[in-house]
Image (cartoon, rainbow, N blue to C red):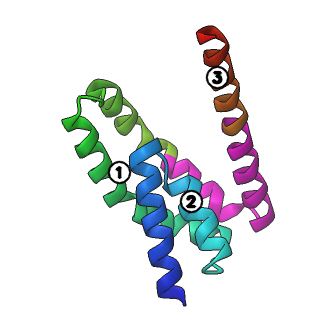
Amino acid sequence: MDVAAAIAIGVAAGVTSGMLGVGGGILFVPGLVFFLELSQLGAESTSLLAIVPVAAVGAWRQHRYGNVRLRDGLIVAALSPAGVLVGVWLSNNLSERVLKLSFAVMQLFFAFGLARRALRYKAEDG
């Protein structure tokens, strides 16, 4: 059952990543928590490894379509490791409850922001 769930999570995250540019944080982490019963910290850590090939293939394919802003991506990539070091330290020193709530708040913040932008663009078109 774990292998089937991992396959389903991987396929769903791959499709969603290719279509929407998400996967690791959006699907991997909740999927690993809910279906494979990993701890929040274990799911977040496992997701970091799992997202590497997803991001590489997605960026490669989108680059072929001319959709990658290489300079911006390289700037983000260059600055992210410092943040990762801080984030890993925090995740290992915060409680499981705080990690889950922080993850949920972050998801809601971005969901509402994206929905608001989509509604604003619709209003401008109509």
Q: Is residue 32 above or below residue 82?
A: below
What amino acid type should be assigned to the residue bearing mark 1? Ala
Residue 83 vs residue 65, the one in the foreground: 65
- Which circle's residue, 2 or 3, is located before the other in the chain? 2
Query: Disc 2 designates what residue?
Result: 27
What amino acid type should be assigned to the residue bearing mark 2? Leu
Q: Residue 123: x and y, percent?
A: 67, 13
User: Could you classify mark 1 by the number of other residues whose Cα lies within 10 Å: few (under 14), some (14-19), or many (20 or more)?
Assistant: some
Q: Which residues are magenta?
A: 84-110
Residue 76 vs residue 24, the one in the foreground: 24
Q: Secondary structure at mark 1?
A: helix
Rendered image: mark on residue 55: 1
Query: Disc 3 designates what residue?
Result: 117
Q: Secondary structure at mark 3?
A: helix
User: Could you classify mark 3 by the number of other residues whose Cα lies within 10 Å: few (under 14), some (14-19), or many (20 or more)?
Assistant: few
| In this picture, residue 111 sits left or right of residue 19 | right
